[in-house]
Image (cartoon, rainbow, N blue to C red):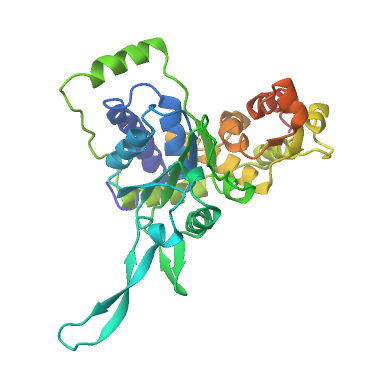
Amino acid sequence: MPTQPTAPDALTELSRGRDVILEQLDKIIIGQKTVLNQMLIALFARGHCLIIGVPGLAKTLMVRSLAGTLQLDFKRIQFTPDLMPSDIIGTDILEENRETGSRQFRFHKGPLFTSMLLADEINRTPPKTQAALLEAMQEHRVTASGQTYPLPEPFMVLATQNPIEQEGTYPLPEAQLDRFMFCVHINYPDAADEQRILLETTRGMVATVQAVLNAEAILRFQKLVRDVPVSPHVALYATQLIRATRPGSAEAPEFIGRWVRWGAGPRAGQYLLLAAKAHVLLTGRPSVSCADIREYALPVLRHRIFTNFAAASEGVTTDDIIQRILAEIKEPSY
């Protein structure tokens, strides 16, 4: 790959790279193209994903395969109630110099020092360990014994949650939920995909993925995403969508006050724009439209809107509310 491609070359390279990545992943992951696309969008926008799905939907395999196509170091942490912050960050170990006989502490890096981290069942670990992961996600660095250590770049966390079993879990606080760019829902495959899964996974053949991009290329494209221009018209539309989620706001429709306890903050608007920017680059386009904002409203907003008892009693979900907001809030006029 060229070191510094021009903008048109970079658009072509990134769009082609995305197609090849999805083609490679299709060898192992059957269906779930929307989920895989959202993971790629989050990666190039320097975001993190919270993945919610029942057991057995290949969440771990999906993340590991994605890391393989990107030549990124991959590690998995199984979060448990007895997991301590030092178990994921690392700890100081006392070592002896055999030549001089002197002893000194050396920091032994934990599994957090990787480019793509799968945080499995993140809500099963206590808040203290969740907070340690929070700093890493936000700052791309960790602190141990007063020392700060930078994490590898690129750095991405994909955390999973089981929506069924809630006993013995520690719900993620709102501040940590807000650090995730996307909340991705993985649903059951359709009938045709499930039949193919059964046939493919019960044979002796083992499929492998080939590397398509590397860390250097990903960092280049992450910078390119930030450089995509957004018109004031599109930014205003994103602003109106975010403000419409807040009870008491002048822009909020009537049903928001009836069903919503707390709406989305400014970070949701930032992630809406970044998702739209990454989306247009991955599809080979140079500019963002309001339709691109709507494309990622669900994964960006569904974990940032907190419903009240009235919504629960009426069976209204956050996805229902977001869809109604999208129907209610029209694009601003030029």
Tell me, yes or no, if residue 283 can be seen here.
no
256 relative to 147 in the view: left or right: right
Whole-percent x, y for residue 153 in the image = 38, 56
Judging depth in this view, the residue of 142 and 251 nearest the camera is 142
Which residue is located at x 66 percent, y 26 percent? 317
- Is residue 70 positioned above or below 255 on the image? below
Quarter of the figure with the C terminus: top right
- Is residue 150 positioned above or below 232 on the image? below
Judging depth in this view, the residue of 70 and 257 nearest the camera is 257
Tell me, yes or no, if residue 321 can be seen here.
yes
Whole-percent x, y for residue 268 in the image = 63, 43
Residue 25 occupies quadrant = top left
Which residue is located at x 70 percent, y 27 percent? 321
Residue 312 occupies quadrant = top right
Whole-percent x, y for residue 109 in the image = 33, 63
- Is residue 299 positioned above or below 170 on the image? above
